[in-house]
C-alpha cells in the first residue's frame, strides 16, 4: 500500500496576496490643512479641519491616506486623485434618515476640501450616516485610485471576511464593480455582486457555487440597492444556518442552498503514490505551512524518492516568508525572489538547510496558482530546472502588507513588486512547460500517472 502522511493546521489562506509581516508606524503624521471658516450648506454647518485630532468618523480616512503615502509602491500618491475618487463615491448614496445640523470634516490634504463640501451636501440632502459615507468614500478612494490589490475593509465588514477576502461561513470571494471597473458602494444591475473565487471543499463549493455567478437574491431579499458590507454580513450569517442564494449563471437563473460551516484551516498532504515518485500538496502559504512542509518532507525523504511532484494548484498565495522557507527545502542556496520597492530592491535567499535539494522536482500549476505560489513555482523553475505542468498561473507580481487600523478596519497596501531569480515577472501568469488540464478530484496515483506520461 502506498505510504501516506498528512497533517492539518488551523491557518488562514491569503487569497492572491503576498504579505510581508511588518510593524505599522505607531504614529500617523498629521497633515496640516488651512482651516476655512465654518459654512452652512443647506441646513448643515460644515467646519473643515485637518487630521491632527480627527473626529472618530474620519480617523479611517486620515490613517489610510497617511499609510498610502508612506508605504504604497507607487508613492507619492497624488492627493487630488485620491480626493476625486473619494468624492465620486458619494454619488451612489441614498436617503437614510435625519439630516445633521453640524459636520466637522477632517481633510488629510487641502485637495479634500471639495470632498468635505460634497459630504456635507449629501448629508444635508439625504441624511445618510456620516461614518458609512466616509467608509464608502475610503473604499472607493483606495480601490479606484490604486487598483485591486490595495484595498480597505471597513470595520463592520472585517469579522465576516478573512484576511484573504473569503466570506466566512460560505467560503467565497465576492466583488461588485461597474462597467468602468470601479468598486460600487451600492449593488445594482449595473454593479452586480459577483463570485470571484470559491474555496475548494468549502460550503459554497459543496453547494455548487461557481466563479462568475452573479448573486441577485439572498434569503428571498434582492441585493439591489444594498451596501456591499451589509450584503456580505447577511451572506456570512455568523457561520451557521442555511442561506438560500439566487444566482445568474450565464443566462440561467439558479437557486442554491448553502449550509454554512466554519472554514477549515490550511493543510499539507504528502504521499508516495508510486515507487520513486513523491507527492506534496501545498494549498496555501499561510503562517505555519513551512513547518508542516518540512515535517512532511522529512518523513518522505526516508523513502528516497527520485522525483517530487509539488502541487500548487489553487494555491492562492500567502506570506512571502512561508514561500521562501518552502522553496528553500528544494533550493540549496542563492536567490529565491527579488523584491522591488521605491526605496530599493531586496533579494530573499535560500536558508541553506533544505531536505530535497538534490531531488528532481515537477510543479503543478493552474489559474488558481497565485502570488506567493507563483514565487515558489518561478524559483523552482529558475533554480532547479523544475518543469511547470498544468495551465497558465494567475499572474500577480505584487507584495502586500496588511495594517490593522485604529477604527477597527483593515488596509492592505501593495508595497513592492517581485520577479523570479532570473528576472522573470508574473504579469500575465507563468506559462507551463507542459500544458495539460488536471481535474482537482483526481487521487494521488492518478495525478502522478498523468504527470509521468506528460513529461516523458
Image (cartoon, rainbow, N blue to C red):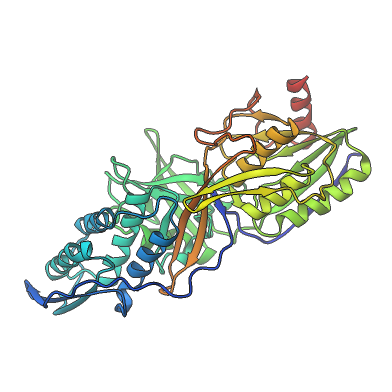
Residue 265 in the image, given as x and y percentages of width and height: 66, 58
Is residue 238 visible in the rendered structure shown here? yes
For the C terminus, give its image quadrant: top right
Q: Nearer the viewer, residue 215 or 6?
A: 6
Q: Nearer the viewer, residue 446 or 79?
A: 79
Is residue 442 visible in the rendered structure shown here? no
Q: Residue furthest top?
A: 456
Residue 257 in the image, given as x and y percentages of width and height: 49, 51
For the N terminus, give its image quadrant: top right
Q: How many marks?
A: 0
Q: Residue furthest front?
A: 344
* Placement of 98 over or under 380, stated as above or below: below
Q: Is residue 226 left or right of residue 159?
A: left
Q: Is residue 235 left or right of residue 272?
A: left
Residue 48 in the image, given as x and y percentages of width and height: 19, 74
Q: Is residue 263 left or right of residue 42?
A: right
Based on the displayed image, in which of its 4 quarters is residue 114 positioned?
A: bottom left
Residue 311 in the image, given as x and y percentages of width and height: 71, 39
Q: Is residue 83 left or right of residue 211?
A: left
Q: Nearer the viewer, residue 83 or 220?
A: 83
Residue at 32% from the left image edge and 61% from the top image edge: 138
Residue at 65% from the left image edge and 51% from the top image edge: 285
* Placement of 84 over or under 422, stated as above or below: below
Amino acid at each position: 500500500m502506498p505510504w501516506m502522511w498528512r497533517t492539518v493546521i488551523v491557518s488562514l489562506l491569503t487569497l492572491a496576496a503576498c504579505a510581508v509581516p511588518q510593524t505599522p508606524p505607531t504614529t500617523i503624521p498629521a497633515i496640516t490643512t488651512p482651516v476655512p471658516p465654518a459654512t452652512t450648506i443647506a441646513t448643515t454647518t460644515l467646519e473643515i479641519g485637518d487630521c491632527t485630532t480627527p473626529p472618530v468618523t474620519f480617523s479611517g480616512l486620515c490613517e489610510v491616506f497617511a499609510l498610502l503615502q508612506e508605504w504604497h509602491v507607487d508613492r507619492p500618491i497624488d492627493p487630488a486623485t485620491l480626493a476625486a475618487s473619494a468624492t465620486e463615491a458619494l454619488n451612489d448614496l441614498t436617503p437614510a434618515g435625519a439630516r445633521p445640523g453640524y459636520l466637522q470634516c477632517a481633510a488629510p490634504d487641502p485637495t479634500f476640501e471639495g470632498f468635505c463640501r460634497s459630504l456635507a451636501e449629501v448629508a444635508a440632502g439625504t441624511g445618510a450616516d456620516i461614518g458609512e459615507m466616509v467608509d464608502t468614500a475610503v473604499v472607493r478612494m483606495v480601490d479606484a485610485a490604486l487598483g485591486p490589490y490595495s484595498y480597505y475593509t471597513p470595520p463592520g465588514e472585517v469579522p465576516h471576511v478573512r484576511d484573504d477576502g473569503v466570506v466566512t461561513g460560505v467560503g467565497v470571494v465576492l466583488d461588485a464593480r461597474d462597467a468602468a471597473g470601479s468598486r460600487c458602494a451600492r449593488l445594482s444591475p449595473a454593479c452586480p455582486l459577483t463570485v470571484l473565487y470559491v474555496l475548494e471543499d468549502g460550503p459554497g463549493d459543496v453547494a455548487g457555487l461557481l466563479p462568475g455567478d452573479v448573486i441577485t437574491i439572498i434569503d428571498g431579499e434582492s441585493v439591489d440597492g444594498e451596501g456591499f458590507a451589509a450584503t456580505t454580513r447577511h451572506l456570512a450569517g455568523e457561520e451557521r444556518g442555511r442561506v438560500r442564494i439566487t444566482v445568474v449563471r450565464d443566462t440561467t437563473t439558479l437557486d442554491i442552498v448553502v449550509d454554512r460551516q466554519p472554514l477549515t484551516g490550511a493543510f499539507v498532504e504528502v504521499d508516495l503514490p508510486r515507487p520513486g515518485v513523491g507527492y506534496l500538496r501545498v494549498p496555501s502559504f499561510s503562517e505555519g505551512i513551512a513547518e508542516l512542509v518540512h515535517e512532511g518532507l522529512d518523513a518522505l525523504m526516508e523513502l528516497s524518492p527520485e522525483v517530487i511532484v509539488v502541487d500548487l494548484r489553487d494555491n492562492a498565495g500567502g506570506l512571502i516568508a512561508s514561500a521562501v522557507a518552502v522553496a528553500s527545502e528544494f533550493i540549496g542556496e542563492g536567490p529565491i525572489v527579488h523584491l522591488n520597492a521605491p526605496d530599493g530592491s531586496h533579494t530573499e535567499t535560500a536558508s541553506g538547510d533544505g531536505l530535497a535539494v538534490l531531488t528532481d522536482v515537477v510543479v503543478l500549476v493552474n489559474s488558481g496558482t497565485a502570488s506567493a505560489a507563483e514565487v515558489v513555482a518561478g524559483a523552482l523553475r529558475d533554480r532547479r530546472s523544475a518543469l511547470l505542468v498544468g495551465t497558465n498561473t494567475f499572474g500577480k507580481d505584487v507584495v502586500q502588507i496588511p495594517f490593522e487600523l485604529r477604527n477597527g478596519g483593515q488596509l492592505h497596501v501593495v508595497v513592492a513588486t517581485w520577479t523570479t531569480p532570473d528576472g522573470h515577472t508574473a504579469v500575465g501568469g507563468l506559462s507551463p512547460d507542459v500544458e495539460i488540464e488536471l481535474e482537482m478530484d483526481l487521487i494521488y496515483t492518478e495525478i502522478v500517472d498523468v504527470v509521468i506520461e506528460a513529461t516523458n
